[in-house]
Image (cartoon, rainbow, N blue to C red):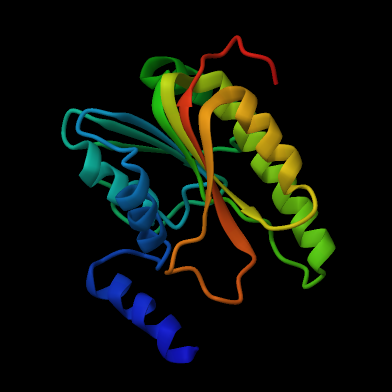
Amino acid sequence: MKEYRDHYFLKAKQENYPARSVYKLQEIEAKFHLLFAGAHVLDLGACPGSWSLWAAKKVGKKGRVLAADLHTPSVEFPPEVLFLKEDVFAISPAFAEQLELLGPFDVVLSDMAPKTTGTRFTDQARSFDLAWQALDVAQSHLKAQGHCVVKIFMGPDVPKILARMRTLFDSVKTFKPKSSRAESKETFLIGLTFQGQNVSS
């Protein structure tokens, strides 16, 4: 298991990404083709910055990535990325202004995870809360026909959020990247083709 972890950790360092999580997004993109040149992307809980960095490469100079997190990543973002130190669920006037200027978004990403306690039920419940709130943000700020990626820890509440997503998107998939640690309970919920803000939730 150690060699498996080291492979992605060392690869990230060699390719100048702050975390191995970049390869999870790359696997998601390879399977679902969410990002494109010129796209506007909202990255919720962006720290340590790997997803925003790689998304910026995919959207190119005509695209934009609005990244937000309570913590400031120790990376230098390219001009395509605007990072704001913000609570993504308590939207400040400054954050609201950028959401209005850059949105609605083609893709909303959330790789957020709670601080784990070691108690599976508690960690799953906290992960569900984050995923549910991330979906609230996506529902408010996605373009019609846009896409959403939300991380969640597998548990008894997952069917509830999947049922909600199926009312919002034409198609909903679950996906665990190979670059996720085998022992990790995380999976990613992929909402494809948003039906628009006025659908029921």
Decide which of 123, 157 is in the foreground and name it.
157
Decide which of 111, 16 is in the foreground and name it.
111
Examine the rendering and report whether any part of residue 26 can be seen: yes
Decide which of 97, 63 is in the foreground and name it.
63
Task: Locate residue 65: give its quadrant.
Answer: top left
Image quarter hosting the C terminus: top right
Residue 148 position (above or below residue 128): above
Q: From the top left corner, tell me how far across and down residue 15 is, in percent.
A: 23, 68
Name the residue rendered at 44%, 31% in the picture: 147
Q: From the top left corner, tell me how far across and down residue 13 is, in percent.
A: 30, 74
Q: Which residue extends farthest top? A: 198
Task: Locate residue 74: give its quadrant.
Answer: bottom left
Q: Is residue 122 left or right of residue 195?
A: right
Residue 186 position (above or below residue 31): below
Name the residue rendered at 51%, 17% in the picture: 195
Q: From the top left corner, tell me how far across and down residue 166 is, in percent.
A: 62, 30
Q: From the top left corner, tell me how far across and down residue 153 is, in percent.
A: 67, 58
Count the numbered circles shown: 0
Q: Is residue 151 left or right of residue 31?
A: right
Q: Which residue extends farthest bottom? A: 2
Examine the rendering and report whether any part of residue 53 can be seen: no
Name the residue rendered at 29%, 75% in the picture: 11
